[in-house]
Amino acid sequence: MTQRLSSSAELAHPAAAFKSARSWLARYAMVVVLPILLGLGGVISPAFVSADNFSNLLLQFAPLAIVAMGQSFVMIVRGLDLSVASMMATTAVISTSFSGTDRDIASIFAASFIVAVAVGLLNGFLVTKRQVSPFLATLATMILLQGFRFAYTQGAPSGNVPPLLRVLGSAKIGGIPYNSLVLLIVAIALAIVLHRSALGRRIFIVGGSPVTGRLFGIRSDLVMIVCYVISSCLAALAGLILSGYVGLVDNWVGQGYELDSIVACVVGRVSLKGGRGSILGALTGAAVLVVITNEVLLLGVPIQVQLIIKGAVIVIAAALYARREASSGYT
């Protein structure tokens, strides 16, 4: 009898270890994939592993990572924010609407974040108080922002980006871009909010089940509105950084970031069904997209093929997401 028990225990131990390893791999798969992609880039093109290229990768990474972190907050509470790219373009237009000198930096940031808060509140209000689907609500605000922007600029935005914004968006210190330092500060702050604060716990509870949140005395609607405001404010910050990186402004700054940020979150294991996600996941997903895009550019692939590759990445991410949700017992 003792021998049978000991044999069962021996069999159970490897099975438990395998299950644990599989769970760890599923959770941190992209953290493992990212170094592989970096190594593959070095094999494909020696220029990929140069210091200049890594510095450029960081420059391109920061705006998308900032938007993806904001998107993750919304996705954790079962939402989507399609207005982020339009918010970025709007703040880029705001950045050139003053004198173009550094003395207006405070006014530019103030105006940008006032608009961002208003847009976030509108998105949150439509979703929580009017029961509009997040897709339609944020699509509507995206179109509204486009309309206001084109009306304000008459379709031809002009003006100069202040020098300080150019420094923030494209300058480097010791090879490290300033925008990466901003990203680091923002990421640490958001990680503390999401994973170490009472608000973060409420966000995950509401994302898991808004009804359960209400039973716990949590104002679920308010939590969701806060998440939309956070997303809009981060999109505004990314828009200002991107306008400094580009060095000029048009009505389409940030175009495509709404979908890229969602894909980055999905790749980083932020659940579209809510209740699960992390800042590290959003950052990792954004990094994977930026690295793949950079490798494709270094290969000199035509734009048509680049779009095909990007579409394939989205399809693969969606397939992996569906498989992960099925295996985790989500319905």
Image (cartoon, rainbow, N blue to C red):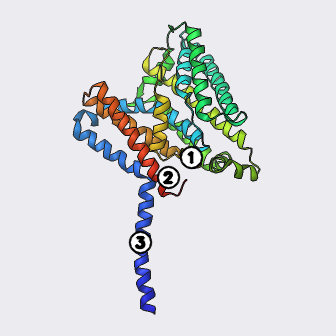
Going from N to C along the chain, the mark reached first, 2 or 1, is: 1
Question: Would residue 96 be seen by someone viewing this image from the given angle?
Answer: yes
Do tag 2 and tag 3 residues touch (Cβ < 8 Å)?
Answer: no
Q: Nearer the viewer, residue 31 or 182?
A: 31
Which residue corresponds to mark 2?
325
Callout 2, which amino acid?
Glu
Q: Is residue 33 above or below residue 9?
A: above
Numbered tag placed on residue 15 in the rendering: 3
Question: For the residue marked with disc 3, what is the amino acid?
Answer: Ala
Q: Amino acid at mark 1?
A: Lys
Q: Is residue 295 left or right of residue 12?
A: left
Q: Is residue 218 left or right of residue 290?
A: right
Secondary structure state at the residue bearing disc 1 = loop
Q: Secondary structure at mark 2?
A: helix
Q: CA distance from mark 3 to mark 1?
A: 30 Å
Single out the mark in the foreground, 3 or 1.
1
Residue at (44% x, 38% y) in the render = 286
Q: Position of residue 271 (x, y in %)?
A: 53, 46
Front position in the image: 238 or 134? 134
Pick whichever, 312 or 182, lies toward us: 312
- The residue that label 1 is drawn on is 273
Q: Earlier in the sequence, mark 2 or mark 3?
A: 3
Q: Are marks 2 and 1 in contact (CB under 8 Å)?
A: yes
Instruction: Find numbered disc 3 in the image and state the secondary structure of the residue it sits on.
Output: helix
